[in-house]
Amino acid sequence: MKLGFLASHNGSNMQAIIDACRSGQIKAAPVVVISNNPDSGALQRARRESIPACHLSSRSHPDPAALEQAILQALQQHETELVILAGYMKKLGPAIISAYRNRILNIHPSLLPAYGGHGMYGEKVHHAVLQAGEKETGASVHLVDEHYDNGRILAQTRVPVQPSDNINTLAARVLQQEHELYVQTVADIVTGKLPLP
Ligand code: GRF
């Protein structure tokens, strides 16, 4: 199976999946990395791994419809079969979602549907979890549809919140679990153990 990635920042989840492809834990090939951020760690990682890397954003394509087509073309040109969002901070347009219906995954650092939705991303999620005094949080891998953090949940992992946690310690503990969860979920999709609709 050919995997295409969209990532905006560091790309550590993407790297975990690439590493698992290289080691054979995931029987798939990373074929393209797309980022809206020309300086992202994700693009640097892609270049280091010799995976085709493109910067596509409102800077390269000021017209949103043209940008959406450029992203779709990049995915299709590399024959992407499964699209993996890994810290991608932009909403995908409807043409991409319908071209890859039920074939786009995202990871979110909470136990969805809790602490998800528009504006709930990155540190804001962990801040809200701590503010609410939750004893437990986690991460979720879900299918992407037209709404934020809304598609079918495919897999979740639970992470304890410690009384001494701050945003950084909690984010780091969750991120470590995200890597394992995302790798295992993609591996299970590729083998068919986790069938997509
Ligand atoms: C992760 O916490 C992910 O859940 C969220 O953004 C972060 C991305 O981290 N969507 P990285 O870029 O994969 O290191």
Image (cartoon, rainbow, N blue to C red):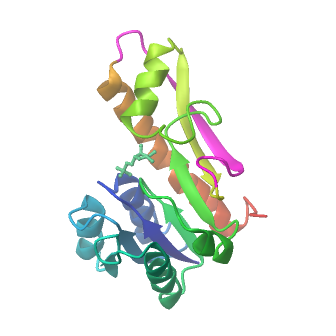
Region of the chain picked out in magenta, as a range:
147-165
Residue 6 location in percent, x, y? 43, 66
User: Which image quarter is the N terminus in?
Assistant: bottom right
Q: How far across and down, in percent of the image, does residue 119 sit?
A: 47, 39
In the image, residue 155 lies in the stretch drawn in magenta: yes
Magenta stretch encompasses residue 64: no
Residue 54 at least partly seen: yes
Residue at screen point 64% across, 58% down: 146
Q: Which image quadrant is residue 104 in?
A: bottom right
Task: Left or right? Give the position of 161 relative to 192.
Answer: left
Residue, x 60% and y 46% (percent of image)? 149
Name the residue: 65% across, 68% down: 103
Instruction: Please state if 117 lies on the left or on the right of 193 as rendered.
Output: left
User: Nearest the camera: 105 or 69?
Assistant: 69
Q: Residue at x 37, y 32 (%)?
A: 171
Using the image as rendered, state which of residue 151 and residue 147 is in the foreground.
147
Residue 180: x, y in percent?
A: 49, 47
